[in-house]
């Protein structure tokens, strides 16, 4: 039987069930646990852990204690929250039980290089365990319920949630959404205390749909477009398992193109279109999204004159005034958002 054909019950007789794990790692170079002995500890076969693995491609590792090892699957999009969607789960080498508590940075150049974070852990019960199907009941702090893993081909499996949705009120991200547009005005609003003010960056309007660590983009007309190289995967990695729909634009700042974020329209399964602008901005700021290819734009309640002066000094095209109590109106040009040129 080749390594790619091993099922979760294979005991790795050609060196023990941890032979492949040890063969991929050098204990002198990685902080991961690499036990020396061949004897395996025996637990109650009820420990599970899900680790968020920021490797070359972000994924989540599901590990189940079985016969003294952690039987493991890499799940690129994380565990499904609803029975309507199955997720790919790639069976990987067995890990030692000590890995259930491992968090740390696997060095560059080593197998699985990148940050490993415990996303959830707890206990599980086995309903069925065979080479082609594993049925379990998970009891964690972030994920609980009945799941089945079933083998499709080689190391490729699928994972399916057997219980109803973990969050019945959650809604999926929309397939596409046209952005809200501002009307042009020559003067700042007369009641500045009712408005928030942002810089107008003069870039290309772009929405980002982030889910399962992956990102897709649409343009000002709601059409699918490619983002700059590396932006989608790196932005998705920062949000991790949190689904979000972000509004922003691709603009040239300091001589390089970056993604400027200034609104969040859907977060953690909840549409935010009817939520006031002030609350959406607070939610966006709370995400702490900042990286080399993206930045969360600043905003300034009730301070339009100062923002307009700063925009003119930086040779920006203008200022956006947005009513603090305004909802988001997809595809509409609304007086609740106003573009005021600097010239």
Image (spheres, rainbow, N blue to C red):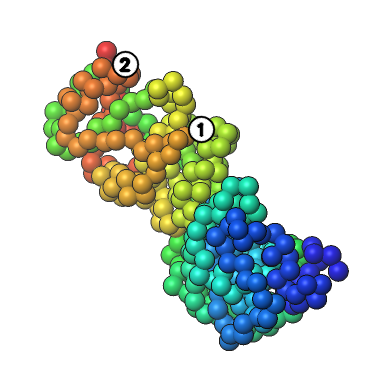
Mark 1 residue element: loop
Q: Position of residue 280 (x, y in %)?
A: 31, 47
Does residue 87 appear in the picture of this structure? no
Judge by depth and name the residue closer to the eye, 319 or 47. 47
Q: Quadrant of residue 162?
A: bottom right
Q: Which residue has dot 2 on it? A: 315
Can you tell which quarter of the image residue 74 is in? bottom right
Specify which label sits upstream in the sequence, 1 or 2.
Answer: 1
Pick out the residue farthest to the front: 28
**Mark 1, residue position:** 219
| Residue under the point 17% across and 24% down | 305
Horizontal arrangement in the rendering, residue 126 relative to residue 267 (left or right): right
**Image location of residue 312, percent across then percent down:** 26, 17
Identify the residue shown where x is 47% and y is 38%.
207
Marks 1 and 2 sit apart, C-alpha to C-alpha, by 25 Å
Is 57 drawn above or below residue 37 in the view shown?
above
Near mark 2 (Cα within 10 A), the count class, few <14, some 14-19 or many ≥20, is few
Decide: few, some or many residues near mark 1? Use Cα within 10 Å; few <14, some 14-19, many ≥20: many
Q: Residue at x 49, y 76 (%)?
A: 122
Horizontal and vertical percent position of residue 56? 60, 47
Say which element carries label 2: loop
Relative to residue 31, is residue 19 depicted above or below? below
Most foreground residue, 149 or 222:
149
- Percent across and percent down for residue 224 are 57, 36
Residue placed furthest toward the top: 343
Does residue 290 appear in this view? yes
- Position of the N terminus, as image quadrant, is bottom right
Name the residue at 79% across, 62% down.
Answer: 4
């Amino acid at each position: 039987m080749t390594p790619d054909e091993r099922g979760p019950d294979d005991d790795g007789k050609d060196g023990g069930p941890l032979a492949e794990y040890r063969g991929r790692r050098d204990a002198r170079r990685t902080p991961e646990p690499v036990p020396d002995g061949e004897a395996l500890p025996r637990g109650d076969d009820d420990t599970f852990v899900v680790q968020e693995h920021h490797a070359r491609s972000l994924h989540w590792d599901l590990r189940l204690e079985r016969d003294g090892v952690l039987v493991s699957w890499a799940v690129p999009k994380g565990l499904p929250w609803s029975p309507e969607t199955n997720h790919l789960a790639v069976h990987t080498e067995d890990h030692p039980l000590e890995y259930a508590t491992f968090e740390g940075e696997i060095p560059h150049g080593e197998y699985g290089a990148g940050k490993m974070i415990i996303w959830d852990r707890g206990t599980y019960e086995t309903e069925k365990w065979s080479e082609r199907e594993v049925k379990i009941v998970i009891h964690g702090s972030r994920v609980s319920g009945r799941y089945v893993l079933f083998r499709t081909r080689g190391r490729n499996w699928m994972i399916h949630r057997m219980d109803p949705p973990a969050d019945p009120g959650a809604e999926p991200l929309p397939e596409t959404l046209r952005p809200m547009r501002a009307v042009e005005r020559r003067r700042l609003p007369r009641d500045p205390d009712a408005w928030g003010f942002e810089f107008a960056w003069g870039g290309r309007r772009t929405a980002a749909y982030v889910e399962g660590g992956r990102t897709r983009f649409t343009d000002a007309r709601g059409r699918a477009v490619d983002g700059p190289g590396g932006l989608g995967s790196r932005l998705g990695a920062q949000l991790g398992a949190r689904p979000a729909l972000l509004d922003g634009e691709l603009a040239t700042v300091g001589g390089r193109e970056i993604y400027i974020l200034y609104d969040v329209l859907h977060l953690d399964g909840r549409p935010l279109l009817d939520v006031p602008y002030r609350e959406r901005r607070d939610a966006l700021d709370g995400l702490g999204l900042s990286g080399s290819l993206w930045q969360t734009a600043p905003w300034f309640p009730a301070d339009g004159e100062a923002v307009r002066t700063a925009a003119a000094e930086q040779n920006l095209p203008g200022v956006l005034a947005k009513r603090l109590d305004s909802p988001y109106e997809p595809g509409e040009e609304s007086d609740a958002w106003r573009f005021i040129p600097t010239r």
